Every structure is written in structure tokens, then in C-alpha cells.
Amino acid sequence: MSSIHNYLKSGVEDIIPLLGLLLKKSHAELISISNYQLNLEQKKRLEVLIKQRQKGKPFAYQSGIQGFYHLDFKVTPSVLIPRPETELLIDISLDLFPKKQAVKLLDLGTGCGIIAITLKDKNPHWSVTATDFSAAALRVAEQNCQADISFQQGDWFAAAEGQTFDLIISNPPYIPAGDCHLAELTFEPQNALVSGADGLKDIKIIINNSHKYLQKSGYLLLEHGQNQRANIVKLLGKKFHNIQTFKDYNLQDRAILAQIKN
Ligand SMILES: C[S@@+](CC[C@H](N)C(=O)[O-])C[C@H]1O[C@@H](n2cnc3c(N)ncnc32)[C@H](O)[C@@H]1O
């Protein structure tokens, strides 16, 4: 069994993207060359890819690339794989300010840089700072970036000390330790996912400190997990107003926007 045709009929999970990755061809191109016989080297490499996939390695870590919004991003096992739900944060941010306003944005926990880089690409006149405590993640973000973004390493706001912003965005870790979904996420960095017993440890730190780093009437925009909305609204209560909550494309509560009280 070494023709593309036979592999396509094999029923192996994700055989189309795996063949596409191996031969650098689209699905349509694979079909058009379906009589092609893989050579020994190609067969060996495909078997490795199939085994990795069967053991649960995400395809994005095999290809090293994940699309997000209108761009492709390099990903490595040091960074969380960008999720489509996070595109909601981009949509909300793009609607928030008049087109020409020179917005100062802070992206806390940037990972491979998707939020900072996408918003800078859409708004080249924005001044963007992106932080993470993982040096390995920041190296990936810097490789993904062709624009002028300030990347800073540090524990949450320690990386932005002394600065203030119009908009602070974070997609922080928000899964409770011991949550059953973590069993499916073993290939991704756990410190990008898990946040204390209730999943709110990092969100509390961000909410409790952001008033020091927001300009007058500035906004805080957070991604969060299912069932966390009510708790986060309560946490925002004292210092924030104009709180808006958003559902993702699967109609799950996913994001909260709040404006600092002056
Ligand atoms: C859920 S991932 C989000 C990555 C990226 N922003 C995205 O949306 O795909 C959370 C990120 O926060 C970073 N992080 C976790 N704890 C942190 C901390 N104490 N200070 C700064 N960054 C942290 C992780 O390294 C990770 O990159």
C-alpha cells in the first residue's frame, strides 16, 4: 500500500492533512496525483506522522503552523495552540475604538503572539506591548512578528511596570487543576492552561491589578472558561463598570469586557 490513492482509502485518522504535510500538497492536488507511489523514505516519514497523531499529538505541532484570524502563526510545544474561540477577542477589540485612535494595547500572556500581532496587523498605528513569563513562548512570538511590538518577559504586570494602556487583553490560563478536559491536552504547556483549584487564580491577579495599568476609561478584556462568567462579573464589580459579556461561536460564555471607573 504505497500509492496516495490507497492511503486516502485507508481510513487512517487525518490521513489527508498528514499526506498534505508530507508532500506539501493540498487535498485537491493529492487527488490529482493519486496514482503517485510514495518512496521508501516518504513511507517511513508518513508512518511516523500517523503514529504521532494516533498517540494524540496535535496536528498543529506536527505541521508547526496554525491559522488564526487572517494570519498563519508558527507554533511549537512551548506555546498553546491558538483556538478559534480567541478570535472573539479580536472582533471585540476592533469594534472598541474610533478607527484613527492611537490605542495603547497590552496583551498579557501572549503565547505565540496571536492577539498582539493580529491587532497590530489590523491597526499598524496602535502601540502594542506583549508579555509572557515563558521565554520560550516569547521567542516564538518574536519569530511570528514582523511589526514593531514590544515583547517583555515577566509575571503578569511585572513585565509592564510603570506603563498605562487603553486596552488590556488577556487569554490567561483558566482551567481548574484536576479538570477532566486536561487529559486531552497533555501535549500543550500545562502552565498555559491550569490556574489553581477553581481556574480563577490568574484572572483574579489580572483583575485585582489592572486598575494600576489602565488609562482613564481604559478597558480590560478577558477570555474565560465556561461557568466562570458570574464569578468574574463579581470580581470586576468594585473597580469596573460597563461590563459586557460575550458568547463564542458555540454559544458558550467566553469573554468579558469591562471599563475602569474613573
Ligand atoms: C491560555 S495561554 C494564551 C496564549 C495566547 N495569548 C493565546 O491566546 O493563544 C496563556 C499564556 O499565559 C502565559 N502565562 C501563564 N502564567 C503567566 C504569568 N504568571 N505571567 C505571564 N504570563 C503567564 C502562558 O505562558 C501562556 O502563554
Image (cartoon, rainbow, N blue to C red):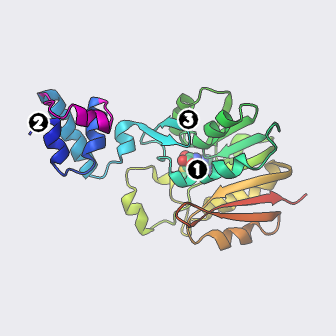
Q: Position of residue 232 (x, y in %)?
A: 68, 68
- Tell me which amino acid carries mark 1: Glu
Reply above or below: 24 against 242.
above
- Distance from disc 1 to disc 2, alpha carbons, whole Å, reads 40 Å
Q: Position of residue 90 (x, y in %)?
A: 64, 48
Dominant secondary-structure state across the stretch colored magenta: loop
Instruction: Give the residue at mark 3.
Output: 141
Q: Residue at x 82, y 68 (%)?
A: 238
- Image: magenta residue range: 24-39
Residue 181 in view in this figure = yes
Quarter that holds the C terminus: bottom right
Instruction: Give the residue at mark 2.
Output: 2
Q: Position of residue 22 (x, y in %)?
A: 27, 33
Position of 95 with respect to 249 (left or right) is right
Q: 179 or 219: which is nearer to us? A: 219
Specify whether residue 28 is painted magenta.
Answer: yes
Position of 70 with respect to 155 (left or right) is left
Specify whether residue 10 is painted magenta.
Answer: no
Q: Secondary structure at mark 2?
A: loop
Instruction: Give the residue at mark 1.
Output: 87
Q: Residue at x 15, y 48 (%)?
A: 10
Q: 61 or 95: which is nearer to us? A: 95
Reply above or below: 37 against 50.
above
Whether ligand 1 has any atom under 8 Å from the Cβ at mark 2 is answered as no
- Distance from disc 1 to disc 3, alpha carbons, whole Å, reads 17 Å
Quarter that holds the N terminus: top left
